[in-house]
Image (spheres, rainbow, N blue to C red):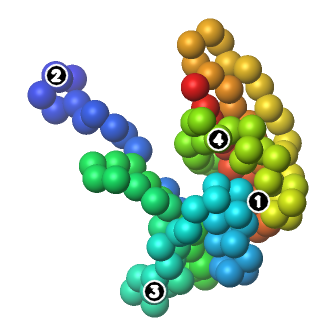
């Protein structure tokens, strides 16, 4: 592969499924202390995480074809600078902290949580 065709970021978007959209959005707004942008996108309830262009972002969705669960891909959300605060708010918001680890030198810390919908989601900080 040449550098001319290589992309800078392979991840461009993610969707976290929910069965109770309002509960899921409230959970993420509570633990990150920021409002998600709620909208109806082509008939699908959607709440987008904050971002600045150009940026990678994603959303909470309630879509019939998507099911929350522990199996499958794990999305890691940026908690840089607020990692410990976010971890503290998770149980209060109805979620569960599964693990917290120190990564190799220079790579930061990571955690895995279970949200109110039963999704396993990661957190990362440098």
Given contact means CB atoms under 8 Å apart, are the residues at marks 1 and 4 in contact? no
- Helix, strand or loop for disc 1: loop
Can you give x and y, in whole percent of width and height, for residue 19 in the image? 71, 78
What residue did someone put label 2 on? 2
- Helix, strand or loop for disc 2: loop
Instruction: Find residue 34 and report its image quarter.
Output: bottom right
What residue did someone put label 1 on? 115
- Between tags 1 and 4, which lies in front? 4
Can you give x and y, in whole percent of width and height, for residue 47 in the image? 52, 73
Q: Is residue 94 left or right of residue 16?
A: right
Sequence-wise first label, 3 or 2: 2
Sequence-wise first label, 1 or 3: 3
Q: Residues within 10 Å of mark 4 (few under 14, many from 20)?
A: some
Tag of residue 82: 4
- Between tags 2 and 1, which lies in front? 1
Q: CA distance from mark 4 to mark 3?
A: 29 Å
Q: Quadrant of the C terminus?
A: top right
Sequence-wise first label, 4 or 3: 3
Nearest the viewer among 35 and 71 is: 35
Q: CA distance from mark 3 to mark 2?
A: 40 Å
Nearest the viewer among 31 and 98 is: 31
What residue did someone put label 3 on? 40
Q: Residue furthest top?
A: 105
Given contact means CB atoms under 8 Å apart, are the residues at marks 4 and 3 in contact? no
Say which residue appears at 79% left-offset and 32% top-offset: 100
| 26 is higher (above) or lower (below) than 69 | below
- Between tags 3 and 2, which lies in front? 3
Q: Is residue 40 left or right of residue 124?
A: left
Instruction: Find residue 40 and report its image quarter.
Output: bottom left
Sequence-wise first label, 4 or 2: 2
Q: Quadrant of the N terminus?
A: top left
Say which residue appears at 34% left-offset and 53% top-offset: 52
């Amino acid at each position: 592969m040449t550098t001319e065709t290589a992309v800078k970021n392979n991840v461009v978007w993610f969707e976290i499924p929910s069965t109770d959209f309002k509960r899921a959005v409230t959970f993420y707004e509570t633990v990150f202390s920021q409002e998600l942008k709620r909208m109806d996108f082509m008939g699908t309830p959607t709440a987008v995480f904050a971002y600045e262009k150009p940026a990678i972002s994603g959303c909470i969705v309630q879509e019939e074809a998507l099911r929350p669960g522990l199996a499958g891909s794990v999305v890691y959300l940026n908690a840089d600078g607020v990692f410990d605060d976010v971890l503290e708010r998770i149980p209060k918001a109805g979620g569960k902290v599964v693990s917290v680890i120190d990564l190799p030198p220079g790579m930061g810390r990571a955690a895995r949580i279970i949200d109110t919908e039963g999704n396993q989601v990661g957190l990362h900080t440098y």
